[in-house]
Image (cartoon, grey):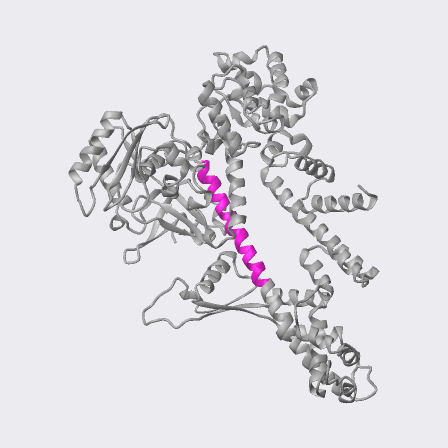
């Protein structure tokens, strides 16, 4: 690396450290870890001393920003080389390009030197009119502009008339102004500060015709104030050709800026032509370009917020508490095709499947109730999991009636979002080749109650239905963000290698779909894995991949009790030395000594013990926590799903009624809560408490069990307004 390249690298890392507010040295070491192919979950968990304990969120922010800054530096080099090759690179221009903080600034400086498609100014230059344009712009002509224009009339290659020559000169001036990077910068700032998004109804509607965009038929809002979710709603309305959208920009302000930058004295006729060219430049070239930029920026902000909301909701959904140790009857409700049933035992094994037809058109209600009761009694099922789709509430009423005859049985409503996507997937076909699609959905509904994470990873993340305008977001961006969420959740919990599916294993740090399936194949051929080291027998799973994945793999009842903890194999010696200091061995972790070990670990002085064992304090803290609870599933400390034994209808609801509910989705303007009736209720952002909040996620997350009070019930529109406020309104 040359001295100049080293200096550029240093400047980039200094800027990165400043932006994420972390020590320069830690940022340098973290970037080295990323460049060496280490995964973010691995770095976050097992390289805390190096990173200064950056978590996954900060590490992903760092990695994303690093990619942008490297792209920026690369583009600067390309632009400088491009201008240098033209022999037009000045020292001042080079300084400005090197100092640019954003890609857009670099592109602005490059604009005058960029190879353009055929433009009016380009055609005028081909006619030799650039000197005339410069004469008008500088105001240096000794004669009138019309006199000056006469010398540029050329019947063969040039202008044919004075008017044509002057028009060509003005086209060149318009492009010069539009290519002025500093002028564009000011125009962009003014548009952001004073611009207004103006939205109107585009198409003529039939009488009484309604659309979801009624509030936008005549709507204006400042560019700097419009919330991200509104931008995506408006974009969708425009795409559907219902709305027209434009950005009104402060023309007076930009014209004043043009006069300040190009305010040299000119003869009256030259000034008049300049004024005309300046207005043309603004209206035809600058304003449309700035409008496109602003719309793109607003859309990017809207997408970023939508992805942020979806990611947070998905994180909460995946990490809901598993319901372990229960035999579950899964119900995928339906009308014409019936309700599909699947009983699964506490390991997720399917015991029996069936179909019942309690709802129209068959209305075999008694037969359906009898079948449910038989399945519950035959397999000792103690929870009924009902999908929340079509015919869900009618099926809920049936379940409530059945369990009155079955003491100890409860039911729960489960989000069935994505169940149909899973049931039609190659994975579902491979798992259950003997069942049709709908029966697979019933199995999925039952299993996602038992272990939401293990089941939901089988579904494309964007199909799980906890987002906000996710269908309006660039698919690649959404997929990358949601993939990162699933990866963080899976590695945060850890994966039992002897029961996990290939779909779950592929999200473990360092593993791919190929190596994950290789682990399943090894397990099927050799029986249960008894040691993490056996992972090295999997084809294409080498030492680097093993280093990344080993700590996140769990092996219950294996050869080494440490294999059932988050302790990484590289730290086994430290863990064993720690236990030895306390008078125990690793074998004691799996025996009756565990309570005593926990007590002893609780008394460990981290600072002093870290010095004795020659290990970093963060690593030792993690080892102590891991040894206190071998085999621990962090989700078990969360609140379990809300189990019910009776059913309500919307007609039963009255303002003031207090209910317990499950948060199903959180969006910018509120949260949707399942309170046990047909329609989820909405808590508006203004109803989360007696204090102002910026976002509902400050108060609730998907899966939370919360107490709410009914504010209003609109039976005609099937809307329920809820509040979490306390006291009189």
x and y, in percent, of residue 726 in the image: 40, 47
- Viewer-nearest residue: 445 or 590: 445
Q: Quadrant of residue 365?
A: top left
Residue 713 covered by magenta stretch? no
Image quarter (top left, top right, bottom left or bottom right) of the C terminus: bottom left
- Viewer-nearest residue: 700 or 319: 319
Residue 296 covered by magenta stretch? yes
Q: For the point 82% across and 82% down, which residue is it?
A: 140
Give the residue at the far front of this rendering: 156
x and y, in percent, of residue 586 in the image: 56, 14
Q: Quadrant of residue 383?
A: top left
Residue 214 visible within the image: yes
- Viewer-nearest residue: 612 or 692: 612
Residue 496 visible within the image: no
Q: Is residue 218 above or below residue 632?
A: below
Q: How many labels were placed on the picture?
A: 0
Q: On the picture, is 619 further left or further right than 342?
A: right
Q: Quadrant of residue 643?
A: top left
Q: On the picture, is 513 further left or further right than 282?
A: left
Q: On the picture, is 131 further left or further right than 518?
A: right
x and y, in percent, of residue 412 in the image: 32, 37
Give the residue at the far top of this rendering: 583
User: Magenta stretch: dominant SS?
Assistant: helix
Q: For the point 72% across and 50% down, which residue is it?
A: 73
Image quarter (top left, top right, bottom left or bottom right) of the N terminus: top right
Q: Is residue 164 above or below residue 217?
A: below
Please give the range of residues in magenta. Answer: 294-319
x and y, in percent, of residue 599 in the image: 54, 17
């Amino acid at each position: 690396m040359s001295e100049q390249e080293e200096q550029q690298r240093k400047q980039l890392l200094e800027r990165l450290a400043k932006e994420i507010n972390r020590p320069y040295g830690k940022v340098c070491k973290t970037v080295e870890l990323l460049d060496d192919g280490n995964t973010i979950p691995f770095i976050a968990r097992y390289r805390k001393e190096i990173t200064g304990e950056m978590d996954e969120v900060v590490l992903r922010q760092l990695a994303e920003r690093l990619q942008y800054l490297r792209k920026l530096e690369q583009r600067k080099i390309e632009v400088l080389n491009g201008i240098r090759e033209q022999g037009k690179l000045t020292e001042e221009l080079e300084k400005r390009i090197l100092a640019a903080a954003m890609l857009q600034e670099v592109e602005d400086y490059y604009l005058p030197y960029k190879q353009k498609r055929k433009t009016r100014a380009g055609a005028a230059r081909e006619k030799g009119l650039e000197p005339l344009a410069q004469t008008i712009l500088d105001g240096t002509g000794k004669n009138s502009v019309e006199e000056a224009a006469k010398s540029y009339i050329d019947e063969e290659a040039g202008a044919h008339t004075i008017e044509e020559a002057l028009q060509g000169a003005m086209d060149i001036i318009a492009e010069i102004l539009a290519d002025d990077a500093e002028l564009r910068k000011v125009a962009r700032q003014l548009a952001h500060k004073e611009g207004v998004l103006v939205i109107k109804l585009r198409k003529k509607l039939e009488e009484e015709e309604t659309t979801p965009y009624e509030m936008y038929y005549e709507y204006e809002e400042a560019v700097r104030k419009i919330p991200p979710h509104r931008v995506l709603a408006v974009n969708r309305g425009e795409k559907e050709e219902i709305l027209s959208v434009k950005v009104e920009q402060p023309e007076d302000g930009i014209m004043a800026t043009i006069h300040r930058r190009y305010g040299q004295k000119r003869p009256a006729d030259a000034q008049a032509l300049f004024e005309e060219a300046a207005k043309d430049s603004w209206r035809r070239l600058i304003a449309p370009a700035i409008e496109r930029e602003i719309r793109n920026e607003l859309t990017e902000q809207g997408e970023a917020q939508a992805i942020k909301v979806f990611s947070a909701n998905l994180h909460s959904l995946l990490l809901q508490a598993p319901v372990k140790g229960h035999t579950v009857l899964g119900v995928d409700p339906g009308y014409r095709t019936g309700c599909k049933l699947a009983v699964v035992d506490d390991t997720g094994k399917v015991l029996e499947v069936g179909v019942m037809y309690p709802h129209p058109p068959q209305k075999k209600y008694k037969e359906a109730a009898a079948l449910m009761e038989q399945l519950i009694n035959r397999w000792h099922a103690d929870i009924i999991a009902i999908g929340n789709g079509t015919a869900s509430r009618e099926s809920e009423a049936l379940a409530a009636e059945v369990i009155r005859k079955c003491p100890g049985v409860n039911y729960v409503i489960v989000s069935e979002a994505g169940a149909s996507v899973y049931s039609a997937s190659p994975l579902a076909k491979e798992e259950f080749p003997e069942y049709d699609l709908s029966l697979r959905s019933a199995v999925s509904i039952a299993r996602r109650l038992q272990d939401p994470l293990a089941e939901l990873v089988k579904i494309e993340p964007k199909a799980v239905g906890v987002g906000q305008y996710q269908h309006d977001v660039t698919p690649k961006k959404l997929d990358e963000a949601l993939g990162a969420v699933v990866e963080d959740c899976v590695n945060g919990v850890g994966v039992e290698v002897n029961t996990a599916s290939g779909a779950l294993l592929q999200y473990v740090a360092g593993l791919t779909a190929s190596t994950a399936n290789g682990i399943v194949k090894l397990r099927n051929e050799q029986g249960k894995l008894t040691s993490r080291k056996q992972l090295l027998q999997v084809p294409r799973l080498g030492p680097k991949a093993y280093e990344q994945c080993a700590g996140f793999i769990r092996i219950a009842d294996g050869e080494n009790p440490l294999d059932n903890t988050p302790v990484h194999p590289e730290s086994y010696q430290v863990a064993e030395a720690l236990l030895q200091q306390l008078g125990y061995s690793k074998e004691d972790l799996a025996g009756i000594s565990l309570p005593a070990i926990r007590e002893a670990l609780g008394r460990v002085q981290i600072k002093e013990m870290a010095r004795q064992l020659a290990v970093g304090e963060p690593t030792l803290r993690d080892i102590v926590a891991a040894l206190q609870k071998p085999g621990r599933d962090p989700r078990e400390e969360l609140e379990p799903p809300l189990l019910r034994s009776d059913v309500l209808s919307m007609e039963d609801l009255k303002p003031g009624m207090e209910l317990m509910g499950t948060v199903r989705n959180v969006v910018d303007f509120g949260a949707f809560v399942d309170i046990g009736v047909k329609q989820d209720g909405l808590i508006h952002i203004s109803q989360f408490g007696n204090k102002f909040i910026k976002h509902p996620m400050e108060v609730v997350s998907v899966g939370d069990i919360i107490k709410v009070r009914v504010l209003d019930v609109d039976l005609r529109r099937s809307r329920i307004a809820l509040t979490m406020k306390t006291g009189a309104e």
